[in-house]
Image (cartoon, rainbow, N blue to C red):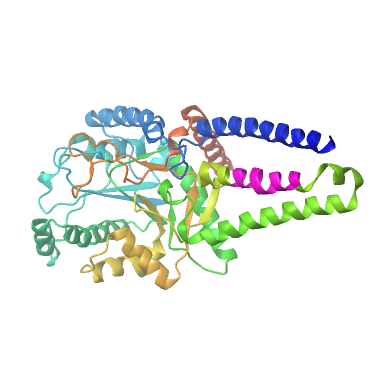
């Protein structure tokens, strides 16, 4: 009779557990659909450009105003905090550049804009091939529009690479393009150089967040006993931060450890206390540790790493899984000492510029930081070398994308940005007074 009652109790408990489990599954399905490492991932919903569309509209409005009038530029009496360099190549009738530049500049206070030197390089030997060549908004927004250096054989090399047009030619030409950008930035001696691709959208307040992140990265670098870091990443591909296969031994060890701890606690309670001894029978322990806990562990992994263990806001080392080259900020010392010579002297290397840079950093122990949450979004579905939707530029499954960027609240960001500007303005007033 007692055994029957206990069996009914176990069955009732397990049915209750299944009900709670089902409720948890429903909750996680609604919470984790943006995580590409989750079984609940819904790309058709996760890739909807919500905040990015809002910023695109703002960017278009700003760029259209810049068509008819000049906007605030870099104050060339001072060395800029940031040189922002963007190389843009024709996508054969499709361009993201107007949206990218508009999102970078829209919302900036005059004080902020005057501390930024903006370089836009139309990376063609014949720049008239680019859709945005001599567009009034481009002329009014950029501080510099460089061309390939004509006094060297570089332009002949680039012409040949343009004719070849294959992936290896694209990768080699990309390094030359970066060397042009970095060299142009070096002329104004900025504190940092930021390279951006021409198909990104920046959030409102990206500048003050970048400055804050750079200050923290510098402090953390000193705490590690180093005098400089290679770069700060302001964008990374959310698809690469899931459950990685090379870490599965750690996941298995952690799961087994949970089970061992759970069994040990239950056995200890049975041994030490009379009441638990009656409740925690062998059957109960088996159901809890052999069925319920494995189901919960499985659900934890199924829900996805980004959903269950999201990166905390702040600055983190990212020596692995840091893709791609959409947005990187380099201390100017690194640009002069390493990057410029690197891109100039290894232009025959056939690796893509991001892979090439990561390989070099791994071989030279370069510190690579990343800011969370990211400051820009990659919105370009149409690549300059053939990938993506050639008609509409729509988002594709294999493009780098941050699935949580679209959750940004434009009102909160605008308030945060406004508060920072007010604080800086007040500090400047005090400095002037005293």
Residue 291 falls inside the magenta stretch: yes
Query: In the image, which residues are magenta?
Result: 283-297
Q: Is residue 309 visible?
A: no
Q: Is residue 401 visible?
A: yes
The number of discs equals 0
Quadrant holding the N terminus: top right
67, 404: nearer the viewer: 404
Quadrant holding the C terminus: top right
State the image coordinates of residue 95 (x, y, percent, origin top left). 21, 38
137, 245: nearer the viewer: 245
Please identify the dominant SS of the magenta region.
helix
- Give me the residue at 23% from left, 43% from top: 388
- Give me the residue at 22% from left, 28% from top: 68
- Give me the residue at 56% from left, 31% from top: 27
Q: Is residue 74 left or right of residue 136?
A: right
32, 191: nearer the viewer: 32
Q: Residue furthest front?
A: 1
325, 63: nearer the viewer: 325
Q: Residue furthest right?
A: 274
Q: Is residue 13 left or right of residue 172?
A: right
State the image coordinates of residue 110 (x, y, percent, origin top left). 40, 37
Residue 418 falls inside the magenta stretch: no
State the image coordinates of residue 233 (x, y, percent, origin top left). 43, 53
State the image coordinates of residue 206 (x, y, percent, origin top left). 44, 41
């Amino acid at each position: 009779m007692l055994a029957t009652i206990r069996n009914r109790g176990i069955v009732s408990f397990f049915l209750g557990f299944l009900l709670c489990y089902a409720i948890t599954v429903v909750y996680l399905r609604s919470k984790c659909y943006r995580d590409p490492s989750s079984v609940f991932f819904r790309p058709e919903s996760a890739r909807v450009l919500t905040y990015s569309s809002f910023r695109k509209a703002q960017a278009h409005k700003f760029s259209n105003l810049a068509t008819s009038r000049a906007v605030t530029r870099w104050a060339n009496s001072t060395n800029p905090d940031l040189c922002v360099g963007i190389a843009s190549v024709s996508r054969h009738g499709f361009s993201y550049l107007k949206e990218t530049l508009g999102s970078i500049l829209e919302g900036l206070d005059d004080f902020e804009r005057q501390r930024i030197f903006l370089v836009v390089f139309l990376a063609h030997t014949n720049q008239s091939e680019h859709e945005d060549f001599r567009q009034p908004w481009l002329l009014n927004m950029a501080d510099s529009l460089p061309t390939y250096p004509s006094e060297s054989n570089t332009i002949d090399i680039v012409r040949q690479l343009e004719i070849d047009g294959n992936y290896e030619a694209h990768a080699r030409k990309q390094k030359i393009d970066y060397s042009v950008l970095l060299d142009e930035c070096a002329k104004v001696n900025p504190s940092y150089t930021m390279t951006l691709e021409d198909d990104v959208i920046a959030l409102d307040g990206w500048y003050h967040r970048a400055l804050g992140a750079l200050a923290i990265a510098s402090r953390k670098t000193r705490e590690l006993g180093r005098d400089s870091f290679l770069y700060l990443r302001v964008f990374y591909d959310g698809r690469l931060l899931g459950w990685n296969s090379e870490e599965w031994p750690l996941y298995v060890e952690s799961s087994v450890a949970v089970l061992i701890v759970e069994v040990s606690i239950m056995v200890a309670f049975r041994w030490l206390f009379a009441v638990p001894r009656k409740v925690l029978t062998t059957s109960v322990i088996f159901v809890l540790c052999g069925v319920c806990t494995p189901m919960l562990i499985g659900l934890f992994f199924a829900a996805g790493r980004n959903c269950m263990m999201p990166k905390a806001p702040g600055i983190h080392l990212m020596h692995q899984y840091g893709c791609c080259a959409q947005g990187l900020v380099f201390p100017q010392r690194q640009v002069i000492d390493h990057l410029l010579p690197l891109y100039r002297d290894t232009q025959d290397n056939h690796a893509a510029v991001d892979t090439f840079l990561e390989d070099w950093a791994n071989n030279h122990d370069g510190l690579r930081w990343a800011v969370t949450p990211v400051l820009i979004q990659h919105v370009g579905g149409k690549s300059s070398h053939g990938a993506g939707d050639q008609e509409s530029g729509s988002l594709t499954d294999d493009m780098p994308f941050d699935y949580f960027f679209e959750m940004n609240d434009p009102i909160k960001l605008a308030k945060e940005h406004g508060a920072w500007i007010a604080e800086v303005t007040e500090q400047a007033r005090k400095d002037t007074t005293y």
